[in-house]
Amino acid sequence: MRKLGGAVTHMQQNLINEKQLEDLTAVKFLVGDMNDLVGERPKSLMPFCDQVIEFLNSLSKNLMSSKEAKQYPDIITLGFWIRKSSLLQLKDRFHKEDENALRMGRGIAFHIAPSNVPVNYAYSLVTGLLTGNVNIVRIPSKDFPQVDIVNRAIVKTLDEYADLKKYIYLVRYDRNQKVNDVFSIICDSRIIWGGDQTISEIRKSSLSPRAGEITFADRYSLAIIDSDKYLSLASKERFAEEFYNDTYLTDQNACTSPRIVVWTGEKVEEAKDEFWKLLHNLVEKKYTLQPIMGVNKLTSSYIAAAAGVCDRIEVHEDNYIVRVHVKEPDSSIMELKDNSGYFFECECHDLMELRGLCNNNHCQTIGYLGERDEIMPLLLSGIQGVDRVVPIGKTMDFDLLWDGYDLYERLTRNISISI
């Protein structure tokens, strides 16, 4: 770790003492320099400023042209999302010019990324950059190849945009409250991904009085498939691919990944039989199943049976897909969820039967195939959960409206100007 050099500015003297600076020596800076971080604070930027958009567009080109990156669909999806045309569409949606107000980044954003979704940290970083903030991002401790590929592309792109180097710090460190204390007290916004336990741990570190916090707690999601609509699809193979992308690409660890498949319509058994066969063929070709995954899914299905939440475990020739048929689609079954191709399943004649499943603030996304209007009575029934309703195949698509938060509003400061 490079030794800290130079004087600490007056602003940092009010925030960080000598002991706290020593605590930062436990941090490995993968992108960015510690000396820059403890030096003079960079100015906040306006949201969607030209320089950030051009930087992200260049980063997109570097990722999309990388042979390594092309091996990972989640990296290519990230690269596609940060194209200039895509970012300008976001700007049109969120950044409205107002002569009586001015938006600026809040200052320093401290991001804690989840440990089990490789590129989530990059989406969080991009969100902080687009909203005009300096970003300290604690990346996953697990060695994902995607992290190395994205980080190398960021470093390469920053060589062309030196002025943005003080806005990006990608760090890695073991669980360390002293480090959390330092980053928390200097930040203006804290963004915690990774679940209830992580949130509780990070909240032991105090924020400054004016700082805000955004938390992404443990969530679960579901898929609703209209069997009649499914059987009328022109390409059922493509639909299986879209479902695969929603689930298996992240080993079903993403909060957006459906944990339960709900079937509606008149031809449920016919649709189920065809859908699961096509998905199995795809998973068998594309997915790497570790032996421990099969053991875990088998164990989880037996536990669900012993707990009385299911009436049968569907017959399966191998462990690529394990389906547990539940008696009642209630939120309590999610305490027994698993991943890597482990699905609860049920049939439903009226979507209001899902109220027990969705009336929980841990319920995040409904992926659907069918008519959205059929979901509206459920959403309007006053349920506590469901922040997103998207077509199956789009559950992983990131947006600045996420988990019920307007990230643009939460990560910017609105300066009122009286004329």
Image (cartoon, grey):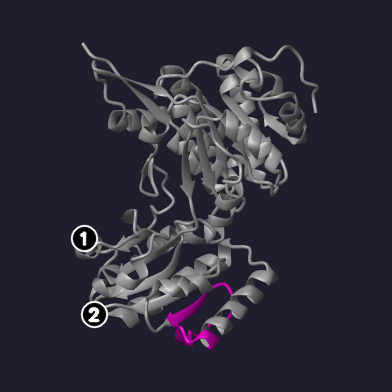
| Whether residue 159 is situated above or below residue 204 in the rendered picture | above
| Whether residue 277 is situated above or below residue 148 in the rendered picture | below
| Whether residue 317 is situated above or below residue 127 in the rendered picture | below
Whichever of labels 1 and 2 marks the residue nearer the N terminus, that label is: 2
Say which amino acid is labelled 2: Glu
Could you say where residue 283 lies in the image, as x and y percent from the top left?
A: 54, 66
The image quarter containing residue 80 is top left
Q: Is residue 318 left or right of residue 191?
A: right
What element does badge 1 sit on?
loop
Q: Residue at x 59, y 40 (%)?
A: 69
Q: Residues within 10 Å of mark 1 (few under 14, many from 20)?
A: few
Q: Is residue 408 left or right of residue 251?
A: left
Could you say where residue 378 lies in the image, as x and y percent from the top left?
A: 24, 65
Q: Is residue 359 left or right of residue 39?
A: left
The label on residue 266 is 2
Say which amino acid is labelled 1: Leu
Q: Residue at x 72, y 12 (%)?
A: 7
From the image, which quarter does the C terminus lie in? top left
| Magenta stretch in the rendered image | 306-325
Residue 102 vs residue 188, the one in the foreground: 188
Residue 330 vs residue 351, the one in the foreground: 330
Residue 66 visible here? no
**Which of labels 1 and 2 is toward the front?**
1
**Would you name the residue on which mark 1 appears?**
380
Q: Residue at x 38, y 52 (%)?
A: 394
From the image, which quarter does the N terminus lie in? top right
Q: Residues within 10 Å of mark 2 (few under 14, many from 20)?
A: few
